[in-house]
Amino acid sequence: MTTIRLTAAQAMVKWLGVQMTPGGERFIEGMWAIFGHGNVAGLGEALQQGLQGDLCGNDPFPTWRGQNEQTMAHAAIAFAKGRGRRQAMAVTSSIGPGATNMVTAAALAHVNRLPVLFVPGDVFANRRPDPVLQQIEDFDDGTVSANDCFRPVVRYFDRITRPEQLLSALPRALRVMTDPANCGPVCLSFCQDVQAEAFDWPAEFFAPKVWHIRRPAPDARELDEVAALILAAKRPAIIAGGGVIYSGAEATLADFASAHRIPVAETQAGKSALAQAHEMNFGAAGVDGSAAANAALRAADLVIGVGTRLQDFTTGSRTLFAPEARLVSLNIHGHDAAKHGATSLVADAKVALEALTARLGAYRASPDTGARADWLRAVDAHCGAPVAAGALPSDAQVIGAVQRATGAEAIAMCAAGTMPGALKLLWQPSQGGYHMEYGFSCMGYEIAGAMGLKLAQPGREVICFVGDGSYMMANAELATAVMRRIPFTVVLTDNRGYGCINRLQTLGCGGAAFNNMYVDCLIEDQPQIDYVAHAASMGAHAVKARDLDDLAAQIAAARGRPIPTVIVIDTTARDFPGTGIETTAGPHGQFWDLAMPEVGDHDNLRAAYARYLENAALVRLTN
């Protein structure tokens, strides 16, 4: 047997360099790295060889330097989402805080079913120098390290304590990351001494391998049952989730909805699977849903979930669908397909929709398309409303200005705060023109996510919406994007605090304003933060928009720059109430279960609890 003598770290980099997609690209398109003790001498040396030496032949294996372990992992996750899970990235850190910084990102990837390879350094397998710097010592279990925090938030966890364990661990990792049902993050906790140990590796271990993503066909019995339910339905409605996009089923869903005249509502992950212009796209579903989509779902006698995990925002905490409505769930994973007592159709979305079309023949529903037209007119009026003299624009007015200033190639992206709900409700994308991290709703994802998304979709304009609260949590990857010349546009809406949660606190929960807006923090001196100066200090082009017209002009000007542009605009902390448009956010529409206090000392709290009891009585108690 021919062997190649390499360190374990060198073998990992060399192996990752030859794992290919059917299109001839690497599946792991490089590794994000912040080096420290625990990965600098092992993986650091191997990555240097992979990039500049002959470890990976004539195709160097890229290394990307981040500013924070969590945010560089966010960039990797956004890249995988932007590539429709057909490519991914790896992320490595030192032991201790470098590793635990990535746990939040691992949870984000897990919730969103997105592939990323985490390679945190770990303590010494031989335990000779224990306890080492940053080592967590468990008094009762000598095998525990800080990296055990990854176990509940990854799909596959392995601790590499001998070099030859990579012979099985690496293929297992890629099998998980390319499995359409179990896809998610992987953690290979790499003991630092093992990274540097040499081993005689079988040469065939480094033979190029192409990873194909399966398309499971539906079970014949399940297909017959679901087809019969649709044929018997008078008012069916579809909820399209992220699984439509990961299956590459966008065109198939478009044809299915048009052929059978079934309205489509969207989740955050599924938005832009259909362009907003598609005749059957009725808009957002659920708590942050449109009037047209939620009316169709309330009236539906059959709700058809396609590639959605039916999260509480989508179902209005299980109150959106009529009690007598049947639920069908077409999903690649049986766990998701069986939720809420649904009739399951476990299969790839594209394959299953094609099979259903063949069974349905000339079946056509009769949706209320007038409701869709009314909704879109209301959106245009709401987003195009002029700003009153002396007032600050709302988030909706900002969205409208940005929408009018961008073309069909623009991708709107965001993660947390007010903007996700507002964008889901109001942004009108072309197909593929929306990228939202709302499974984990992680504040601080936005800047790094925009960078990763631009790497994945270099030909499209990326517009990153971020509030001042999220920007303050994580913004340092702006410096990375400047260094790497990765251009995207940041629209930073400054409402001087956590405006979204303040509205939920005061309007949705009946509470008093407290600890969310700077003005409500019981401090005399309010922060006066110069976001333009801050972004400019990292090398970005930064500017304060005077008004909505200036905002649009600055977005147009940003397109010619090779670096990120940050446009700051002051906005009102109040939005939506009294607009005459159904936003279904909190008390203004569809129910969201927030476990209200049973007793309180003022009328607003008591009234909120009474509303809570009224809505909670409507919950469908199914599994």
Image (tube, grey):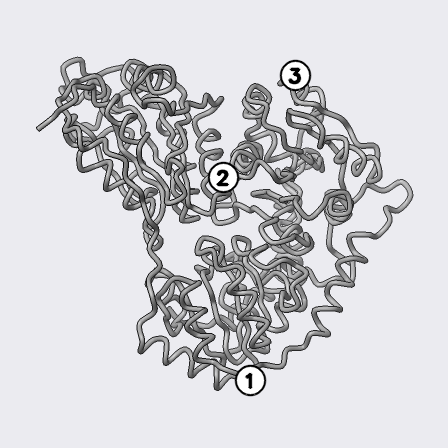
Q: What's the residue type where badge 2 is placed?
A: Ala
* Helix, strand or loop under label 3: helix
Q: Is residue 224 left or right of residue 517?
A: left
* Helix, strand or loop under label 2: helix
Residue 323 image point, x, y percent = 50, 79
Q: Nearer the viewer, residue 614 or 466?
A: 466
Q: Earlier in the sequence, mark 3 or mark 1?
A: 1
In the displayed image of the protein, which residue is found farthest to the left? Answer: 1
**Vertical position of residue 448 compared to residue 184: above or below:** above
Q: Can you tell which mark lies on residue 234?
A: 1
Q: Residues within 10 Å of mark 2 (few under 14, many from 20)?
A: many
CA gap, disc 3 and disc 1: 59 Å
Viewer-nearest of discs 3 and 1:
1
* Quarter location, residue 482: top right
Q: Nearer the viewer, residue 242 or 211?
A: 211
**Vertical position of residue 172 compared to residue 359: above or below:** above
Task: Return the residue at label 3.
Answer: 537
Residue 598 image point, x, y percent = 52, 59
Q: Earlier in the sequence, mark 3 or mark 2?
A: 2
Q: Is residue 74 left or right of residue 138?
A: right
Who's the residue at 44% across and 32% down the image? 73
Viewer-nearest of discs 3 and 2:
2
* Quarter location, residue 288: bottom right
Whether residue 97 is visible = no
In the displayed image of the protein, which residue is found farthest to the bottom? Answer: 232
Quadrant placement of the C terminus: bottom left
Residue 383 image point, x, y percent = 78, 52
Residue 305 image point, x, y percent = 47, 67
Task: Return the residue at label 2.
Answer: 78
Q: Residues within 10 Å of mark 3 (few under 14, many from 20)?
A: few
Q: What's the residue type where badge 3 is placed?
A: Ser
* Quarter location, residue 118: top left
